[in-house]
Image (spheres, grey):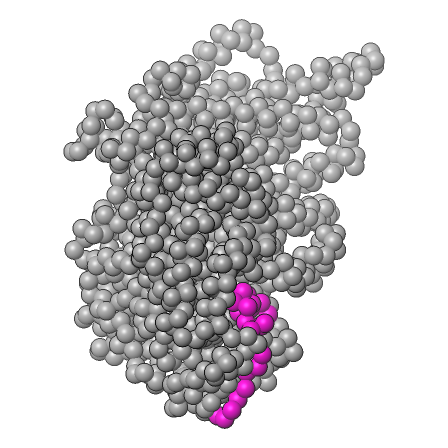
Amino acid sequence: MVRFLLNRLLMLVPTFMGVTLASFAFIRLIPGDPVELLVGERGIDPARHAQLLHDLGFDRPLWEQYLGFLGNVLSGDLGKSIVTKQPVLDEFLTLFPATIELSVCALIIALVIGLPAGIVAGVRRGSAFDHSVMTVSLTGYSMPIFWSGLMLIILFSGILQWTPVSGRISALFWVEPVTGFMLIDSLLSDEKGSFASAASHLVLPSIVLATIPLAVIARQTRSAMLEVLSEDYVRTARAKGLSPFRVIGLHALRNALIPVVTVIGLQVGVLLAGAILTETIFSWPGVGKWLVDSIFRRDYPSVQSGLLLIASMVMLVNLFVDLLYGLINPRIRHAR
Amino acid sequence: MKRMHLAAAVGLAVSIGLATGAHAKTLVYCSEGSPEGFNPSLYTSGTTFDASSRNVFNRLVEFERGTTKIVPGLAESWDVSSDGLAYTFRLRKGVKFHTTKGFTPTRDFNADDVLYSFDRQRDPDHPYFKVSGGQYEYFNSMDMPNLIKAVEKVDDNTVKFVLNVPEAPFIANMGMDFASILSAEYADAMMKAGTPEKVDLDPVGTGPFQLVAYQKDSQIRFKAHPDYWAGKAKIDNLIFSITQDASVRYQKLKAGECHVMPYPNPADIEAMKNDSDINLLEQEGLNVGYLAFNTEKKPFTDKRVRQALNMAVNKQAIIDVVFQGAGKAATNPIPPTIWSYNGAVKDYPYDVAKAKKLLADAGVSGLKTNIWAMPVQRPYNPNARRMAELIQADWAKVGVEAEIVSFEWGEYLKRSKLGEHDTVLLGWTGDNGDPDNFLFVLLGCEAAKDSANRARWCHKPFDDLLVQAKRTADVAKRTKLYEEAQVVFKEEAPWITIAHSVVFKPVRKEVIDFKIDPFGGHVFYGVDIKG
Amino acid sequence: MVATAEVQHEELAAPAIHPLREFWFYFSENKGAVVGLFTVIAIVVMALSAHVLAPYSPIEQYRDHLLLPPAWQEGGSWAFFLGTDATGRDILSRIIHGSRYSLLVGLIVSTLSLSTGIAIGLIAASFRGVLEAVIMRMMDVILAIPSLLLALVIVAILGPSLENAMVAIAVVYLPHFVRLTRASAILELSKDYVTASRVAGAGRIRLMVVTVLPNCLGPLIVQATLGFSSAILDAAALGFLGMGAQPPTPEWGSMLADAREFILRAWWVVTFPGLAILIAVLAFNLMGDGLRDALDPKLRRS
C-alpha cells in the first residue's frame, strides 16, 4: 500500500510541473496587454507603459519569469493580483468556500437522489421505474445547465417569487466570515433569519449544478448494480435462498459501490467546470467566476495561480479517489 | 413578501457594526462589481470610486451633486496667483476623520493630510509611494507629475500648490477621484505597525460614509459618519449588494432587494418606465462616441474626404438601432452638458449626393478602407460592432468599401494609439467637466503622436486656441476660445461625432432625492429613504 | 464532460455473426434509442434543407417586428411562428439554421479528437518509454484542468469564433481518446496475432495501423458518439459565455447569450434556443445509448 501511494505521488510530480507550465503559458498566450487594460481609453505613454511592465516583472525573459513563478509557488507565494494588488491566495481563499459550499450541496443532492434511484432501477431492471430513471437521467445528462438555470430563475424567482434571484445571502444580513461557509457562519452569527436566507439562496444553484452529476451517478450505479447482480456469488446467494433484501444489501451493494466511488471522484472536475456556468448565472461569488473575470482582465498572476490551484485540487481529489479505490478493492493494488 | 421583509428588517436591529435603532434607515445599492480596492488614487474604474472616493472621501474642491459645478470641499476657499502658477487653498476647520476598528483619530483634518495625499503619488522617495503596487495611473494620465512643482504647507490650515505652467483646468482636477484626501495620521500609525497596505484596504476618510465590512463579490457595508462636517447623512446604513448581471439587478430591484441600480439593460428600459414601483431617472451622459479618421493616412489627409464620409453616415439610424433611443446625435466633440458647448455649430447633413460629389472633387474613387470596432460595451457605445455594420452599409452607398476590424480590448487600445487603423470607433467619458478634458486630451497636438488623439490630427489654428484657453483662468475668455475651437473642429472634420449616450438610473419609489452624477458615479450623501 | 466509455471494451471487439441485423435487433429493442435515431434524422434533414425549410434568412432583421411573441400568444403573428428577437430576426429560422452549426460542431469535434487521439495513442503505445510518459503526463495535465475552463482559455488564446471553439473542445476531449487507444493497443500488442504479424516482418507503422488499430476501434467509436453530444453542449456553453460563435451567427448557445438580457421581458427568445439544444443533445445521447447497448454483448446477456 505504501509503495502504491508513493508511486502515485511520484507520478503527480511531472503532472504538477506540467500544470505550472501550462497555467503560466496560457495567460501569456492570450493576446492582450494587461497594462493597457488597467488604464482604458485614457491611455498611457510608452515610457510609463514600459515602467509598469518592468514593475510587474513582465519585461523579463519568459524563462526567467517562469522560474520565478515556480520558485515562488514552491515557497508558497502565489503572487499578487495586478488589478486589486491583493495576494492571489487571499482572494482565492475568500472565494473558494463559496464554490465548495455550492459543490458539496450539489454533490449531496446528486448522491441522495442518484444512488437510491440507480440501485432500485438496477434491481428492478425493465420496470417502469427503471425506464423513468433512465429517461430522466439521460435528460439531465443532456441538459444545458446555463439554460435550465435561467429557466428556473424565471419560474421560481420571477413568477413564483419563492427563491431569491442571486447571491449567497440577503443584502440585509451581514454574517462575519468565520469558516467561509455561509450555512455554518450564519448559524454561528446572532442574526435571526440569516440561516434561512442563506439556505434559500443555495437551493436553485445547487439543483442546477447537481443536474449532471446526479444523472451520471444514477446511471453508473444502475449499471454497476446490473453487473454485480449477474455475478456468480450473487446468484449463489440467491440460490441459497437468502432474502432479496439481504442479497442486495449485503453482497451486491458493497461491490457495486466500488466503481461508483470512482465516478463520484470524477464528478469533482465536472462540478468545478459546471461551477463556472452556475456562478455566472446566479452571481455566486466563487472561484469559477473569479477566474473567468481574471482571464478577461488579463490579470496574469491571478490566472496562472488560480488555474494552478484548481488543477492541483482536481489532482489531489483524483489521488484520494485512487487511494480509496485501492483500499476497498485490493485487487487493484496487485494489478499495478 | 420581499418588500415586507425589507421593511421589517430596516426596522430591526440590523448588525453589529451598523447603526441600529428604531429609525435606522438602510439603503441597498445593487452595484455592478467588486471594487479593486479602497484607495481611489490607485485605480481608475468607476466601480472602485463609488466604493471609495465618492462616498468615503472628500477632496479640496467638490462637484455639486448632480452637476459639474465646482464647490468648496475640504478647502473653504482658494486663490490663484496672477501668473496662474500658484493655487492657495484655505482648509476647513473641525473636519473629523472616521473612527474605525483599527484607528481612532486624535486630531482634525489639516494640511499634513493634503501633503500626504499628494506626495504619496508624486514623490518616488515617499515611504508610501511603493505601497500597494505604487501605480497612480489616474494622477499620471492627468499629467500631474509634470504639472505640480511643489505642494507646500503654509500653516496648519493653508496649502499652496505651485505649478510649472499655468493650467486653468487645475481646480477641476482637484475635484477628481485621485485627489481624495486620506489621513496622514492613520498612514503614520499603520507604517509604525508595519502594515502600511491597510491604508488602502480599510479606508479612513472624512466622507459621509465609513466602511464597516467588505466581502469580495458579495457585499460592501457602510454606515453614516456621525461627525460628518456637512452634517450626518440622512440614511444610516448604506449597503452595496454586488450583482454583476444587469437583468438580475433589475429582478432584485423589482423584488425590493435593492433600492438603486446602475447600468440597466437597454432592453428593460421600457418595462421600467411602466413599473409603478420604480422611478426611472435619465440624464445625458458626460461622454462622446466618435469615429476618428487617421488623418496621417491618405486619402483622409484631405478634409473633403472626411467631410464627405461625415455626410454619408445616417446618424439617426445609429441612434435608433444601436442606442435604442438611449442616445442623442452628437455635433460637437464635447457634450451639451459641458460649459462652452457651441450650440451654433451645424452638423453635416445626411446627404449621399453631396458626399459623392465631394469624394469626386477630391479625386477619390473605389476607396477601400477599414472601420475598427471595439470588442466591448462602453457607456458611449453600447454595441460598436453593430454601429460599424451600419456605417459600413452607409459608406457602401457612396462607393466606399470598408472592412470591419476588431481586436481584444487592450490590443485595440494599443494598436489604435499607434495609428494602425484607417478609421476607428472609440469614445470618451469626461473626468472633470472641463472642456479641456475633451478637446485637448483627444484632439490636441500633444496627443497626436501615439497617444489619445486617435485621429492623429494636429491642426495648428485649433491647437493654438486650446493652449491659449489652458493658460487663462478667466472662464468667459476660455468659453469664447473653446466655442471657436468647436467651429474649426467641425470644418476640419477629423472625426464623425456620433452620439452622446443617455444615462438611465432606475430607483425605487421610496428613494428620495437621488441624483444622477454626470461623471457616472453614485453618490449617496443627501439621499433619503421613506419609511 | 465526456462520459467515459472505458467499461468493458474488450468484449466490444468480439465479432458478431450477422453484425448489422443483430445490431438492429438489439438496437430497436430500446425504444428510446429509436426515438433518438429518428430525432437525429430529423435534425440532419433540417440542417441539410435549412435554406428551404426556414421561412426567412436567419440574419435578416425585420425592424418593424422587434421582440414579437410566438404565434399562439397574444400579439404574436403566424408570420413569425416562434416570434422574433431584439433585432427583429425570425427565431424559427434561426433555430433551423442553428442545427447546421450544432451538427457541424459535433461532427468536426468528434472527428478531430478521434483521429488525433488515435494517432497520439498509437504513438504512445508503440514507442513505450519516455515519449509515452511525456504524452500521458500531458494528457494528465489536460485532465487536471476543468474542461470548460480549459476550453475557455484555449478559445481566448485563439480568438473567439466557432472554429476555434471546436478546436478547443477537441483538445479538451483528446485525453479520453488517447488513453482509450493506448490501453487497447497495448492489450492487443501482447496478443499472438500481433506477434505473428511482427515475425512475418510487418513494419511498425503497418503493424499499428493495419493490424492493431481495427481491433481497438469499437470502444473508440462509442466514445466518439458520446463526444458528439457533449461537443454540442460544450460549444453552446462557450457560445453562452461569449467565447463561441460570434453574432449574427445563429448558433444556439450564442443565441442564448444574446437573449439573456431579455430574460424578463421576452421568455421566448430564451426558451427556444435552449430547448433546441436540449432536444438535439438528448437525441444523440439516446441514440448513443442504444448503440452502446447493442454493441455491448455483456449487457445483452444479462
Pick the residue in front: B373 or C231. B373
Give the vertical position of A103 relative to B462 (above or below).
Answer: above
Q: Quadrant of residue C27?
A: top left
Q: Is residue B150 magenta?
A: yes
Q: Is residue B365 magenta?
A: no
Regarding residue A204, the answer to whether it shows in the image is no
Pick the residue in front: A317 or B117. B117
- The single residue placed furthest to the front in the displayed view is B361
Give the vertical position of A206 relative to C301 (above or below).
Answer: below
Image quarter where the N terminus of chain B lies is bottom left
- The single residue placed furthest to the bottom in the displayed view is B155
Residues drawn in magenta: B134-156
Q: Percent x, y for residue A210?
A: 41, 44
Residue at 50 percent of width and 33 percent of height: B364
Regarding residue A17, the answer to whether it shows in the image is yes
Residue at 54 percent of width and 65 percent of height: B141
Q: Percent x, y for residue B392?
A: 43, 35
Give the vertical position of B223 relative to A294 (above or below).
Answer: below
Give the vertical position of C74 relative to B263 (above or below).
Answer: above
Residue at 25 percent of width and 26 percent of height: C81
Q: Percent x, y for residue A49?
A: 62, 59
Asked whether, in this view, residue B52 is left or right of residue A310, the answer is left
Q: Percent x, y for residue B221?
A: 37, 70
Residue at 50 percent of width and 29 percent of height: B366
Pick the residue in front: A50 or A104. A50
